[in-house]
Image (cartoon, rainbow, N blue to C red):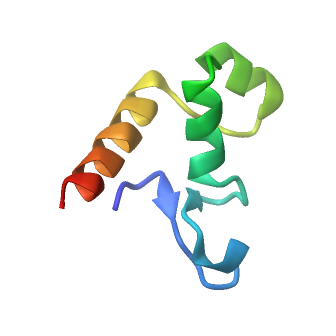
Amino acid sequence: MLDIIETKPNVLGGMPVFRGTRIPIERVMALFVQGYKIKDFKSDYPYLKITKKDIAEIFAYYHQLASK
């Protein structure tokens, strides 16, 4: 799993979240697909340190999971 993602049974029932937060990965990916840009994430989630590279790695990770 990527360093930016963590799962804990006591955080959102074990749903993958951004490390150190309660922000679900799937929520941010859904927003990105709907047209959110990195600047939008930084405005809405100023404490979330996310880069274009992180987004690309997350999509690649989920694509790899879906391919199995």
> Horizontal placement of 31 versus 7: left or right?
right
The location of residue 5, given as percent across then percent down, is 48, 57
In this rendering, is residue 6 above or below 54?
Answer: below
Image quarter in which the C terminus is found: bottom left
Give the side of residue 51 with respect to residue 17, left or right: left
Answer above or below: position of 20 versus 41. below
- Position of 53 with respect to 37 (left or right) is left
Query: Residue most toward the bottom?
Result: 9
Kindly give the residue lying farthest to the left in the view shown. Answer: 68
Location of residue 48 by image quarter: top right
* Residue 4 picture location, percent across and down: 47, 51
Point 66% across, 45% down: residue: 27
Q: Nearer the viewer, residue 32 or 10?
A: 32
Q: Nearer the viewer, residue 54 or 66?
A: 66
Above or below, 55 against 39 in this view is below
Q: Residue at x 60, y 59 (%)?
A: 17
The quarter in which the N terminus is drawn is bottom left
* Residue drawn where x is 59% and y is 77% of the image: 14
Choose top left, top right, bottom left or bottom right for residue 56: top left
Residue 32 is situated, as x and y percent measured from the top left of the image, at: 58, 27
Tell me where residue 30 appears, x and y as whole percent: 60, 37
